[in-house]
Amino acid sequence: MADFVLARKSRNIASSAVHVFLNILLGMFAVLLTVFSGSPALGIILVLVSKWRIFAVRSRYLWLNIKLNLVDLIVGLSIVLLSYYAGSTLMPVHIILMGIYVGWLLAIKPMSTENATFAQSLIAVFLGISASTIMTASLNAIVAVFLAFLVGYAASRHVLAQTNTKDFTLTTLACGLMFAEVAWMCHSWAIVYIFGDTGIRIPQAAIVLTIFVFIYNYARQAIIRYQEDFRFRDIIGPVLFAMALIGVIVAFFSNPIFNI
């Protein structure tokens, strides 16, 4: 019996080690293949193949399965696209993106607490809007609007699906529409902050919408906590601070020198 338990533990350790190793390889090669091939195709294929379980279901469950894993897909595909648009020469930003993706796969994605779910949504918003803004800078505005809607919908649904037993379809659609509206307004004046020769480029819209999602979730949690006793004064401080922060970013950090 002791030998059986020992063998089982050994197999569990071995399988865990293999799982960690494969995720590290995925995080590295999703970026490296994109950089050295000069095309996002191989990186995208690698990410989709790694998520084969999403698609290995009956057709009637496919859309539901995609929705359940939409945040994970957004993060993976955004990493690939950001790597591609950073250039075909290995730069510090590519190393950072590798680290982010490996950290996502090994540490952040497996967590399921409410705070972890919220953090996953914030990461998906920041990376998703960053990738969509840079990618659609020279494309029709409708592409930017659609991608922003998808990111907003996915982030809202990811949080609500973990903590809400009621129908939240309307809430997720409203969040997606708000993202789409911001993307439409920002499309003709896409401000991107560039950090020297590191290759790091952060769109203003990604910062603004990440702040919005943070306040949106803070207000939602306050409403649940206080229920019928909820008053706007319970969230007035963080809301005003977020509005002031967004105002400062838009008013003082929208110099056209950053414009793409």
Image: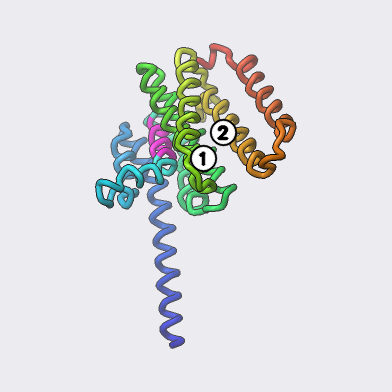
Q: Which residue appears farthest toward the front when viewing the image?
A: 228
Instruction: Please tell me whether residue 79 belongs to the stretch shown in magenta.
Output: yes
Q: Is residue 204 left or right of residue 98?
A: right
Q: Which residue appears farthest toward the left when viewing the image?
A: 59
Residue type, mark 2 in image? Val
Q: Which mark is residue 213?
A: 2
* Image position, residue 70 (x, y; %): 40, 41
Residue type, mark 1 in image? Ser
Contact check, label 2 and label 1, Cβ < 8 Å: yes
* Image position, residue 31 (x, y; %): 39, 40
* Residue situated in front as seen by the camera: 21 or 112: 112
* Image position, residue 72 (x, y; %): 42, 44
User: Magenta region, mostly helix, strand or loop?
Assistant: helix
Distance of mark 2 from mark 1, alpha carbons? 8 Å
* Residue situated in front as seen by the camera: 164 or 78: 164
Can you identify the residue that label 1 sits on?
121
Q: Is residue 173 left or right of residue 64?
A: right
Q: Which residue appears farthest toward the bottom when viewing the image?
A: 1
- Magenta residues span 74-84
Q: Which mark is residue 151?
A: none
Which quadrant would residue 138 be assigned to in this image? top left
Vertical order, 218 against 109 (above or below):
above
Within 10 Å of disc 2 (Cα), the crowding (few <14, some 14-19, many 20+) is: many
Instruction: Please tell me whether residue 34 belongs to the stretch shown in magenta.
Output: no
Vertical order, 3 against 229 (above or below):
below
Q: Earlier in the sequence, mark 2 or mark 1?
A: 1
**What residue is at 53 percent from the left and 46 percent from the top?**
164
Asked whether residue 127 appears in the rendered view, the answer is no
**Quarter of the image containing the N terminus?**
bottom left
* Residue situated in front as seen by the camera: 260 or 51: 51
Asked whether residue 74 appears in the rendered view, the answer is yes
* Residue situated in front as seen by the camera: 243 or 172: 172
